[in-house]
Structure formats: C-alpha cells, structure tokens
Image (tube, rainbow, N blue to C red):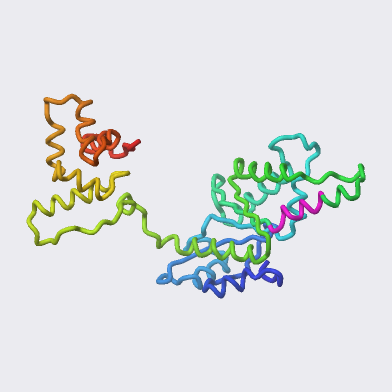
C-alpha cells in the first residue's frame, strides 16, 4: 500500500503533518498501524527508530489495526459458502480473521488474551457485488457459481462485528479510503490531549446576574436562580417565578423538613410556583433533587 500509485493515503497523511513509514508485515494484507511517543521524549522520529531495530517498547503502540481491501473481489470471495442457507457461518473469513489476530500478537509479542481493534475499509464491495449479480443474471447459466447476496454481505459484516468486534466501513472511492485513514490518524493523535468530560461540562453556562460585591443574600438568590434553570424543562421565566416563592435553596429545604406535610404533599408542594398552571412533574423533580441521597438518580 505504501508504494501503490492508486492510493493517496501516504501523501494525504504527510500533508497533514504525520510521519508515515513503510513497515514489512507478515499479515499478507494492506494494513495500517499506529505508534506514538511524546514529542519531549523523542517524538515520532525516536519511536520509528526503535521500531526499525525491533524494539517493541519505549513508545506507545496503539492496539488498532486498519486493513484496506481495495480489491473487492478478494473480500467477496471470502463470503462464499457451500450452502447459502447456512446462518452465521463464514469459514473462510473466520480463518482469515484468526490468522490476522494470531499474526498481530506474534509480531508485537502481545499476550494471548490481547487482540487489536480491527477496522476494515472496504472499497466498492457493495458496488462490485451488484455487478456480479447483473452479470450472473445476464449469462443465465445454471452451472455458474451463485454470487453471495447483499443479505449475506450484511449478515457477514454483522457476524464479524458480533463475533470478532471487527468494524467495517464502506468506501465508494479511493479518496474515501484516504479520508477515513486521515480521520482515524487525527483522532488517535489528538486523543491523549482531550479533556475528560465531566458532569460540569454538561451544565448550561449561565451568566451571573449580580456582581461579586453585591450583598450575600442577593448573590445566593442569583446562584439559586441559575441552579433551578439546570433542571430539565425549567426556563428562565419559570425559574424566576419559582425563586419569588423560595428565594434560596435553604428556604426550599426547610419547607421539605416540615412535619406537617406528608411525603406526597411535599412532592406537589411547588407545583404552582413555576407558571399559571400546575407543574406536578417539575414539583416532583425538585423534591427528588433536594432530598435524594443517590447522586446517580435519574429524573424521569
């Protein structure tokens, strides 16, 4: 693949600023793998130098293997089965996948339990299969082998995903192949620098309605107004109406501590505080938020 003039994978990756290196493989297919090393520790140049002297350590080898099938007939050939009514049984494909996994583990001295995440880029497999059926019907010869059906192709891809966790991406052109590889490379390169998403990043960012120099009770009321708006379905107007009745979180908390109300009454306590009509569900949610001891409790 490195020297294939039809594929622009190498040129596209180099133009994007990534280092690309041809590396002999015993997998018997057009495979792409990724290694990385922090720039301050030597970067890609040092990682490649260590790889070329058969050093499998001192850099990060990403357990991901992408295989490009740019000759669709070869892939379709693995779909052939003795009986078309068999279900979830593609012996040639299973043998090939087992060989890929075994070869990968041997090459990288991985543990028997380790296996790479395999992604297949299938170039015009669906289009070629359609052409095979057109030609088969045109010839009309009963002794000609029957091509796999589109249903069998779909079944085979689902079978690979379930049994081997192998993902497949259909590519209509060789440019699509290069685009998918570049996209994968970018995602893998940027992944270590992506911040961990927390619950705080899922909260609406609302501007404060008062300054830090304002009295404490005004700042508490403003904070409570913004907190109420984080509850699903509560708009700014509804929250503003609500804080007219309960200006702080403490005021609502104290209302829920009353011994004069049953739990059912507490659940509907604030139902008429949001708008002109009763909001029983919102009232129940507010009670749950203020009283539940389970941080993973979902509002339904």
Q: Quadrant of residue 73?
A: bottom right
Q: Which residue is painted at 11% across and 25% down in the image?
A: 260
Front-most of residues 101 and 133: 133
Residue range in magenta is: 123-133
Percent x, y of residue 7: 68, 68
Number of marks in the rendered image? 0
Q: Quadrant of residue 155?
A: top right
Q: Is residue 3 magenta?
A: no
Closer to the camera in the image, 182 or 40 = 182
Q: Residue at x 15, y 26 (%)?
A: 261
Report the side of 51 relative to 219 (left or right). Answer: right
Quarter of the image with the C terminus is: top left
Left or right: 209 with respect to 171? Answer: left
Q: Nearer the viewer, residue 111 or 207?
A: 207
Which percent across, then down, holds residue 23?
Answer: 63, 66
Q: Position of residue 119 (x, y in %)?
A: 60, 54
Residue 15 position, x and y percent, is 56, 75
Can you say which quadrant of the picture contains the N terminus?
Answer: bottom right
The answer to whether residue 126 is magenta is yes
- Residue 285 lies left or right of residue 154; in this view the side is left
Name above or below for residue 288 compared with residue 40.
above
Magenta region's main secondary structure? helix
Residue 79 in the figure: left or right of residue 250 = right
204 and 85: which is toward the camera: 204
Residue 47 versus residue 198 in the image, above or below:
below
**Residue drawn at (57%, 74%), measured in percent from left and top?**
14
Say above or below: 12 vs 165: below
């Amino acid at each position: 693949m490195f020297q294939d003039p039809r594929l622009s994978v190498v040129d596209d990756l180099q133009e994007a600023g990534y280092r690309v290196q041809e590396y002999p493989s015993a997998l018997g297919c057009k495979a792409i793998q990724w290694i990385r090393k922090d720039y301050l520790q030597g970067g890609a140049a040092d990682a490649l130098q260590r790889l070329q002297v058969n050093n499998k350590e001192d850099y990060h080898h990403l357990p991901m293997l992408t295989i490009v099938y740019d000759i669709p007939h070869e892939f379709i050939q693995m779909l052939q089965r003795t009986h078309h009514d068999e279900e979830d049984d593609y012996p040639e494909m299973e043998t090939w996948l087992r060989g890929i996994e075994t070869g990968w583990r041997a090459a990288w001295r991985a543990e028997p339990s380790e296996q790479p995440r395999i992604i297949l880029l299938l170039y015009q497999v669906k289009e070629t299969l359609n052409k095979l059926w057109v030609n088969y019907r045109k010839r009309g010869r009963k002794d000609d082998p029957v091509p796999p059906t589109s249903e069998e192709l779909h079944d085979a891809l689902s079978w690979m995903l379930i049994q081997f966790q192998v993902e497949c991406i259909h590519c209509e052109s060789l440019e699509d192949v290069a685009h998918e590889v570049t996209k994968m490379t970018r995602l893998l390169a940027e992944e270590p620098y992506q911040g961990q998403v927390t619950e705080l990043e899922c909260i609406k960012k609302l501007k404060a309605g008062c300054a830090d120099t304002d009295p404490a009770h005004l700042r508490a009321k403003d904070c409570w107004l913004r907190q109420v708006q984080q509850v699903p379905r509560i708009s700014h107007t509804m929250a503003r109406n609500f804080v007219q009745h309960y200006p702080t979180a403490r005021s609502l908390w104290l209302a829920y501590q009353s011994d004069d109300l049953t739990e059912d009454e507490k659940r509907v306590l604030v139902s008429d505080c949001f708008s002109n009509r009763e909001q029983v569900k919102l009232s129940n949610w507010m009670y749950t938020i203020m009283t539940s001891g389970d941080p993973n409790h979902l509002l339904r």
